[in-house]
Amino acid sequence: MDQNIKGQPNKLPVQGAGSAREKILAAVAQNQPELSELPDIGFLTGDTVNVQEKFITTLTTIGGKVFQVNTFDEIKALIPQHFNTENRVVSTLTELNDIAELNTGNIIDPHTLEDIELSVIRAHFAVAENGAVWVTEQVMGQRVLPFICQHLAVVINAQDVVPTMHEAYKRIAMEHYGFGTFIAGPSKTADIEQSLVLGAHGPRSMTVFLLG
């Protein structure tokens, strides 16, 4: 191979690279399968009858708790009964300002949240079939807030419970968000000696206040 003046081998041009790529893409385009309509999965739509009761049963089964309430005053009365409010309580809900520290995402350093006893946030909606709730940055404030706390409480409007994950994904299909997640029950794992442990890598409990 020829050497340049610095003793390095000269780079030879690759002949026909562009045309080869175009031939491959053209061949792929010419061999596309025929378009077919998406299958009808309407039969997977869940039953909306007693959907709140189904959600309560499912979440309770996987270790969570549900309280049906009509007002935020009821929530404020229940929180001291079930959680140690002498420790740090943080919420994203202005309705709970008098019993909790307000956090709307203005805390930049998540390490300052390491000592939270209870986080109270709102969820967009819940799913009856698996007891999950859907939350995004819009309602969780600081991203770490639902996961760094000892106990998590979530407020959901009772009418915002969908039967299955099919309705759930249909509902979020066109949404725009930076971060979102489904949370179902308290943190748990059975990896160690096949023994179920709650609160292994997140909140030790999950409580849902089903509002109205």
Image (cartoon, rainbow, N blue to C red):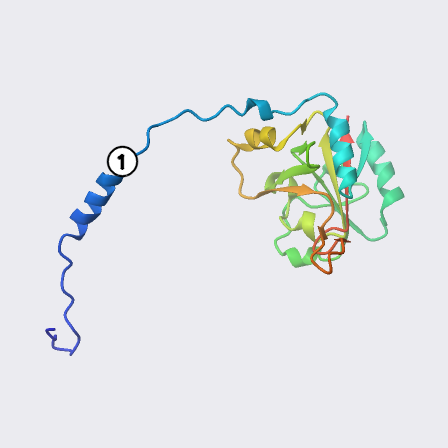
Please identify the quarter of the rendering in which residue 182 is found: top right
Q: Identify the residue at image location x=71%, y=37%.
A: 131
**Residue under the point 24% across and 42% down:** 25
The one nearer the camera, 149 or 14, is: 14
Q: Judge whether 145 appears above or below 176 on screen.
A: below
Picture coordinates of residue 177, whole percent (x, y): 54, 39
Q: Is residue 2 visible to us here? A: yes
| Number of numbered labels in the structure image | 1
Which corner quadrant of the image does residue 127 belong to? top right
Q: Residue furthest right?
A: 81
Q: Which residue is mark 1?
A: 31
Q: Considering only vertical position in the picture, is 188 above or below 47?
A: below
In the image, residue 199 above or below residue 164: below
- Nearest the eye: 136 or 30: 30
- Image location (x, y in percent) of residue 128: 70, 31
Q: Can you give x and y, in whole percent of width and height, for residue 67 in the image?
A: 82, 34
Farthest residue in the top direction? 49
106 vs 193, left or right, is left
- Nearest to the observer: residue 45 or residue 95: 45
In the rendered view, tell whether residue 111 sits above or below residue 142: below
**Residue lying farthest to the left in this orientation:** 2
Q: Quadrant of the N terminus?
A: bottom left
- Quarter of the image with the C terminus is top right
Please indicate whether residue 3 sits to the left or right of residue 83 in the image: left
- Label 1 Cα crowd, 10 Å radius (few <14 / some 14-19 / many 20+): few
SS state under label 1: loop
Residue 96 seen in the current view: no
Which amino acid type is marked by label 1? Asn
Residue 212 appears left or right of 42:
right
